[in-house]
Amino acid sequence: MIKPEISIEATNLTKVYGSLTAIEDVSFEINRGEVLGFLGPNGAGKSTTMRILCGLVRATSGSATIGGISVVEYPEKVKRLVGYMPENNPLPDELRVVEYLRYRGQLKGLGPREAHARVEEVLELCDLHRKARRQIIGTLSKGFRQRVGIADALLTNPEVVIMDEPTIGLDPHQTKIIRDLINNRRGGMTFVISSHILPEVELCCDRILIINQGRIVAKGTSASLREEYIPAKAFRIKAKGELEGLIGELRSLDPEMEISALMEIDEDGFHEFSLKTLNPGIAGEQLLAVIQKNSSWVLREIADVEASLEEIFLAATKRSWEETLGRKPKKIGIVQMEPPLNEPEPPKESQSE
Amino acid sequence: MRGFLTILRHEIFVLLISPATFVAGFLFLLMMWLVYWQVLKAMPSKELPVSLFFQLFWLPVLFMVPLLTMRSIAEERRMGTLESTLTTPTTPLAIVAGKFAGAYVVFLSFWVLALGYPILTSFQVPEGSANFSFMEASPLIGGLLFVAVSGTMYVAAGIFASSLTRSQLVAAMLCFAILFMVILGEQILFTYSGNPETVPGRWQPILDYLRTFRQLEDFSRGIVDSRPFVLYFSSAFVLLGIAVVVVERKATR
């Protein structure tokens, strides 16, 4: 039975290229109007999943539906519902922006007049309506090319917009334009956005889906993922006074508490340190009370620090590697930042096992 | 065939703004002018100037068709724009058919332009001033009909070659090799093996069926046989069919 609120449904999607399994048993649902961030290291299977959803690649097994329509059985119908911006955003260099968009509109089934009107709308929407509209695509900067790709994806006002790395190569101003554009359509269109710019994803996505080695390793809102992968509460404190005594007092709240110095001492004699605890009962007020006990300690700043999406991403991918290697996953409280974000490597033990 | 007309219009537009098309057009018209000039210099002759004009049709075809078709699919595959097109409701069949039709329209347009030479000459030279006719309708129409019919296969061969590779250069060379084999292969074969009449009996009808120049001769005389139509149209369908499968396979892998 088709659930009306579900816009995209993937069930046990698997894609095998020869001896390489690109994705395996990938299942997820995306509600209508939701903005989903699709994260994963390079080669994790993000683009393959997106290409399957667009009807561009056939899954080896499993099924996918867009708006309740099967991608495998009715690829042409599905393509009418989806606006897709592929990775690297290929564009013909010899055409003008307006010519290209009109051509794309007609390919997507718009009549000449309708295509004309819609092109004007998306040109304005993506801030291409001034000088860039008559410019040859081959002469456009990276940022403008990205905007042309986004304009193309939004051209038919599709139910689902899938964008593979839409903000790559954009400056902060252009990134904000894209974010605003997505925010303006939130609730109306369903967005699937793959990106390596994690703060960007956290800012504009309702839910996050993390894929690693072809498998979904985490899904949920950033808050729920934070709770699952980074259960430790973190605070940043900036204080002046006898530090050892202060740390001893703070440890009295939780002996397992991890305290690490962020900055030795600043020009005013203040120490800045971070404090991480797995005890959910500890709140900022308690820390404040401890520090205020002794008048020789001067507090300048106390802040509740949330784990970043980058930390969640690293924790989730690390846990998936540990599970793949058959090791019991550690209860992660504090995440090490060693593996590079875009090119994580499996732990060294994998070579010997 | 959703999107066929859109692709066709786009393809003609892209061909008309492509430098390769202008190079192909210029060289083609230059070569046909030289051919016609030599034909006129050789007059009077047993044959009509228009018939001789068409007998050298293969010379420009060998380079014009590769230049017209080499970028059609190969370049789109290299750029990744073919994949973008396939994310729309357009089918691989419509893409290949549209690209073929676009190149074929331009191919025919060049030939129509080349016919300007005999037509203009016949208007410029006063009637009765030469002991031969500059313009004869039947060899002109027959020759053009042959070029149009055989052109379906030649352009389809170019589209087929372009679908096999991401390199325009490789596509052009492959197309040239196919056309060379198809048009001149049997001539070369007979040149080295002796008289065509010495070919064993059972091969005779097959070789006759494939002889491009005999077909051209028949068309020029006004003999319109259905067999060349079947040969060229069916070959074009097969080549375009393979191109559709290749586009589909490469794009949905």
Image (cartoon, coloured by chain):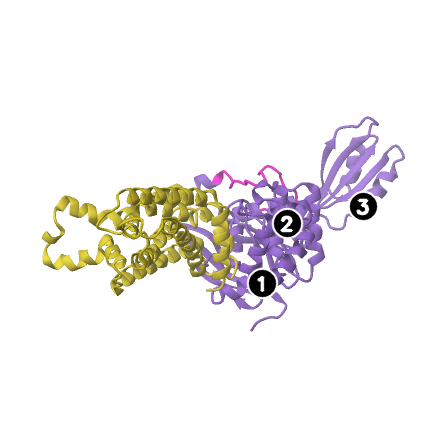
Chain colours: A purple, B yellow
* Residue pointed to by mark 1: A110
Which chain letter goes with mark 1? A
Q: Amino acid at mark 2?
A: Tyr
Residue A257 lies within the magenta run: no
Residue B14 is situated, as x and y percent measured from the top left of the image, at 50, 49
Residue A224, disc: none
Residue on which disc 3 sits: A284
Where residue B8 appears, x then y in whole percent?
Answer: 47, 57
Is label 3 on the same chain as label 1? yes
Location of mark 2 (residue)? A229
Residue occupying the far top of the picture = A267
Q: Of helix, strand and loop, which one carries label 2?
A: helix
Chain under callout 3:
A
Which class describes the residues within 10 Å of circle 3: few (<14), some (14-19), or many (20+)?
A: some
The local secondary structure at tag 1 comes to loop
- The reply to whether dot 1 and dot 2 touch (C-beta < 8 Å) is no
* Left or right, residue A251 beside residue B73: right
The residue carrying pointer 2 sits among few (fewer than 14), some (14 to 19) or many (20 or more) residues within 10 Å by Cα, namely many
Q: Which residues are magenta?
A: A329-349
Q: Nearer the viewer, residue A71 or A222?
A: A71
Outermost residue on the right side: it is A295
Picture coordinates of residue A36 (x, y %)?
63, 56
Residues A287 and A34: in front is A34
Residue A308 visible in the current orientation: no
Q: Earlier in the sequence, mark 3 or mark 2?
A: 2
Q: Quadrant of residue B230?
A: bottom left
Distance from label 1 to label 2 (Cα)? Answer: 46 Å
User: Callout 1: few (<14), some (14-19), or many (20+) C-alpha neighbours within 10 Å?
Assistant: some
Quarter of the image where the N terminus of chain A is located: bottom right
Residue B1 at x, y = what percent?
45, 64
Q: Where does the C terminus of chain A fall, quadrant-wise?
A: top left
